[in-house]
Amino acid sequence: MEGLDSDLARIAGFMSFMCCDTTARNAHSRGYKVLFVQDATATIDLGDIPAADVHGVTVAVQGFMFSEVVLPLQIPKADSPQSYREHPSTSSG
């Protein structure tokens, strides 16, 4: 990612509690702003624990510690001249 001239990591994929979570944590620890796309990540049941519960906990931890949890329509487009800080979903007011 260093060669992409971006400070923003967008996380989407399968196995939200493993691959997505690990990627988001690593990006955060390397100084990237992380967007964890809630509806573009998913997982499976873990034994008796339903996938929705596993995913819900993963998203909650990400939002609490490492990422901004967003929906797909809140993600700035990769080719947009807008920086993340200028994106309407991130305004503080």
Image (cartoon, grey):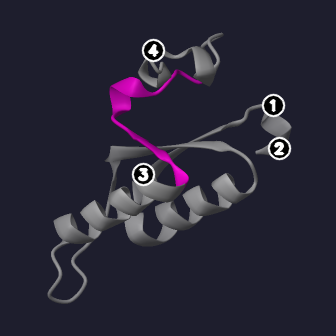
Q: Position of residue 32 (x, y in %)?
A: 69, 44
Q: Which callout, 1 or 4, points at the residue further toward the start of the chain?
A: 1
The quarter holding residue 83 reads top right
| Labels 4, 2: front one | 4
Question: Spatial distance from mark 4 to mark 3, Cα to Cα?
Answer: 18 Å
Question: Spatial distance from mark 1 to mark 4, Cα to Cα?
Answer: 21 Å
Callout 1: few (<14), some (14-19), or many (20+) C-alpha neighbours within 10 Å? few
| Amino acid type assigned to the residue bearing label 3 in the image | Gly
Query: What residue range appears in magenta?
Result: 66-78
Q: Which callout, 1 or 3, points at the residue further toward the start of the chain?
A: 1
Residue carrying label 4? 88
Q: Are marks 3 and 2 in contact (CB under 8 Å)?
A: no
Residue carrying label 2? 2
Q: Is residue 15 visible?
A: no
Q: Which callout, 4 or 2, points at the residue further toward the start of the chain?
A: 2
Q: Position of residue 26 (x, y in %)?
A: 66, 61
